[in-house]
Amino acid sequence: YYSVFWIVILHCRIFSQIFPFNHYSDEEGLPSPTVYMCLQDSTGYMWFATQNGAAKFDGHTFHNFTTGNGLNSNNITSLVLSNEGKIYTGSYENGVNFIQNDRVNEYYNDRNLNPLIRELFLINGTFYCTSPSEFKFIENKKLFVNRGPLEQDPVPDEFTCNSVSKSNNGTLIFSTTK
């Protein structure tokens, strides 16, 4: 049996699986070829944060959202899906919007969110915004800013908060450059 096994294996052609790959750009309807983030919602739509707005993709057609639809900024840098199915957008400037039922709504608009929101996280109803040189959070539509890992610590010039998550015991964990 052992020799039969090797004869069959050696004479069979083995092909690796090739996954389909599609490249989309503004020519296919994406608002911009510069995509900062993507996510899939609970109904299967793909969402893209781009340099020229947010996009919802059904696999065939892009539905784009821009300042013309009510976004605070076209330069969308981050997307978050809430438990209620809302898509929250973090932008390079001017705050946070949410998209629900293909309508743009303002959640928080404040130029004090500058510099840019690098990434937006939603944990138990509080938004955490990472950006160069500081970390911010929005709770009950009020902005709080922390310029370092601890309030008493001065912020190094190179400080960048890259991500935030919550442990099982409720501790917030931040990944930073310093």
Image (spheres, rainbow, N blue to C red):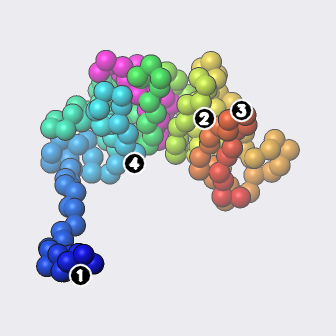
Comparing marks 4 and 1, which lies closer to the viewer? Answer: 1
Tell me the distance, in whole angstroms, between the alpha carbons under discs 1 and 3: 59 Å
Q: Which mark is residue 128?
A: 2
In which quadrant of the rendered image does the N terminus lie?
A: bottom left
Residue matched to label 3: 170
The main secondary structure of the magenta stretch is: strand
Residue matched to label 1: 3
Q: Element under label 4? A: strand
Which portion, as a residue range, is magenta? 87-106
Kindly check if marks 2 and 3 are in contact, taking CB atoms under 8 A apart as contact.
Answer: no
Residue 100 sits inside the magenta stretch: yes
Residue matched to label 4: 36
x, y percent for residue 117? 53, 41
Comparing marks 3 and 4, which lies closer to the viewer? Answer: 3
Tell me the distance, in whole angstroms, between the alpha carbons under discs 2 and 3: 15 Å
Q: Which mark is residue 66?
A: none
Give the residue at x 33% y 40%.
48
Task: Specify which label sits upstream in the sequence, 3 or 4.
Answer: 4
Q: Residue furthest right?
A: 152
Tell me the distance, in whole angstroms, between the alpha carbons under discs 1 and 2: 62 Å
